[in-house]
Image (spheres, grey):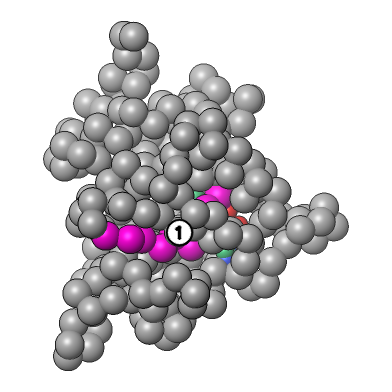
Amino acid sequence: MPLDPTLIRLLMHLRQNGITDKNVLAAIERVPRELFVPESFQDQAYEDIALPIGFGQTISQPTVVGFMSERLMPNKKAKVLEVGTGSGYQAAILSKLFRRVYTIERHRDLLKSAEQKFKDLRLNNIVPLWADGMMGWPEQSTFDRIILTAGLEMVPSVLFEQLAIGGYLIAPVGKPGSDQKLLCFKKDERGISSEELWPVRFVPVLGGTANDPDQQTVP
Ligand code: SAH
């Protein structure tokens, strides 16, 4: 089937912006972003912008998804933990690049909808969980990579504990209301080191879980 011209344009744009990893570009080509975007935004599914997915949350901008995926050093032997499933799009991209993707979302309805998409696309190496991702996933620990797709002031130490030696953790870090920076942490025998990547803007991490409409009134 020929590629959608808006998808071709997006792929060119990502290349021009410095995303060079062939596997990352192939994953973006193969995962239909329109499936993860609400009906009313279908015409913008392949624009390089974040879009609303309900409950005050957003599907990330393709450039950011591409960069974060690339910086996670894709490896078919590695297992990844994602905190903040949202629409499921980032998890779907990671599923093409890693052995297994564990993804946690605090909004039950968002998780259910993402889970259905994983089934429809037969992405059988994604394991979703409805929980507060700030606790990580002790039963499945350790992880070779951890990616946070919601902004926070400080990465909880429990997530570093669940990161394998030699692993990377990537997260948007910044004080609420101020600029966030994407940080990439590396864990080795001596401890944790970090590298600052780029300024970003992600919705904030929220505590606990939300499962009924009354709890889901996020502005
Ligand atoms: N990766 C997503 C974008 C995520 S937006 C995508 O590709 O579409 C951030 C998500 O993090 C939201 O869905 C929000 O509900 C979730 N979130 C916020 N705090 C959380 C927490 N403590 N645990 C798990 N998920 C959380």
Q: Is residue 84 magenta?
A: yes
- Residue ranking furthest to the right: 214
Horizontal and vertical percent position of residue 32: 43, 27
Disc 1 residue crowd, few under 14, some 14–19, many 20+, Cα 10 Å: many
Horizontal and vertical percent position of residue 52: 59, 41
- Residue ranking furthest to the bottom: 190
* Image quarter in which the C terminus is found: bottom right
82 versus 6 height, above or below: below
* Mark count: 1
Of 43 and 31, the residue lying toward us: 31
- Residue ranking furthest to the top: 2
Of 194 and 99, the residue lying toward us: 99
* Image quarter in which the N terminus is found: top left
Q: Residue at x 73, y 62 (%)?
A: 210
| Residue 9 showing in the rendered view | yes
Secondary structure of residue under mark 1: strand
Which residue in the structure is indicated by mark 1?
A: 102
